[in-house]
Image (cartoon, rainbow, N blue to C red):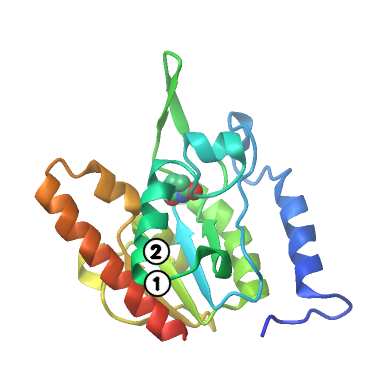
Amino acid sequence: KARELPGGNSEIAWEALREEAMSCTRCHLYKHATQTVFGEGPVSASIMFVGEQPGDQEDLAGHPFVGPAGQLFDRALGEAGIDRSQTYVTNAVKHFKFEPRGKRRIHAKPDGSEIEACRWWIEQEQMLVRPKVTVALGATAARSLFGKVLTISRERGRAQRLPGDGGEAWITVHPSYLLRLPDEAARTTEFARFVEDLRLAKVAAA
Ligand code: URA
């Protein structure tokens, strides 16, 4: 179902896009990050997940969602019966933004101009993958995909239309939100809600 580009196949177009993104200087974040962390997964995927930005471990590994949030995401996908290798996983912002604190690099939230600069890449990924369903993981992803600030609690749990011809979207929390909850009981309840949101997206993409 992947869109065939004139004169080439979409896997090849994706490889070229990824290669181009490796030397992106559309905003200043490339200056301190280790590398661009591009999206991953088959261009024929029917579900695309969009996170916020790579974290410390993703920045070093060069792959999205491999650190603590990624592990929680993997567990939730497993419970929702979604095979990650059949999905396309990417981020709204493709360089790690952080504040140095001693030897540590502390995650810093991307601002509107960084999200806007990086939106060009997401749009290219959307055009190549053309997923049936896009899932925004958290507020940054939702802001990038919808071009406006949305409140997750108000928008989650129902199908949305992406601007233009972007198809169906579902909005849910970011897995890091679950990691930050201080209370064990809340973490359990919120994890179950997250899994439920993923199940809804899976059904929509079937
Ligand atoms: N958080 C994200 O939003 N994306 C990643 O790739 C890792 C953590």
Residue depicted at 39% across the width and 84% down the height: 203
Q: Amino acid at mark 2?
A: Gly
Neighbor class of circle 2 (other Cα within 10 Å; few <14, some 14-19, many 20+) is few
Residue 184 at x, y percent in the picture? 13, 46
Please tell me which residue lies in front, 201 or 134.
201
Q: Is residue 140 visible?
A: no
Residue depicted at 35% across the width and 70% down the height: 80
Q: Quadrant of residue 59?
A: top right
Q: Determine the secondary structure under disc 2.
A: helix
**CA–CA distance in space, label 1 to label 2:** 5 Å
Q: Where does label 1 land, which residue? A: 81
Please tell me which residue lies in front, 27 or 22.
22
Left or right: residue 2 versus residue 82 is right
Neighbor class of circle 1 (other Cα within 10 Å; few <14, some 14-19, many 20+) is few
Residue 83 at x, y percent in the picture? 49, 68
Q: What number of labels is visible?
A: 2
Residue depicted at 39% across the width and 64% down the height: 78
Tags 1 and 2 touching, CB below 8 Å: yes
Q: Is residue 19 above or below residue 180?
A: below
Q: Quadrant of the N terminus?
A: bottom right
Q: Quadrant of residue 146?
A: bottom left
Residue depicted at 59% across the width and 47% down the height: 63
Residue 119 at x, y percent in the picture? 56, 59
Please tell me which residue lies in front, 112 or 22.
22
Q: Where does label 2 land, which residue? A: 78
Q: Is residue 117 above or below residue 194?
A: above
Q: Is residue 136 visible?
A: yes
Residue 204 at x, y percent in the picture? 41, 85
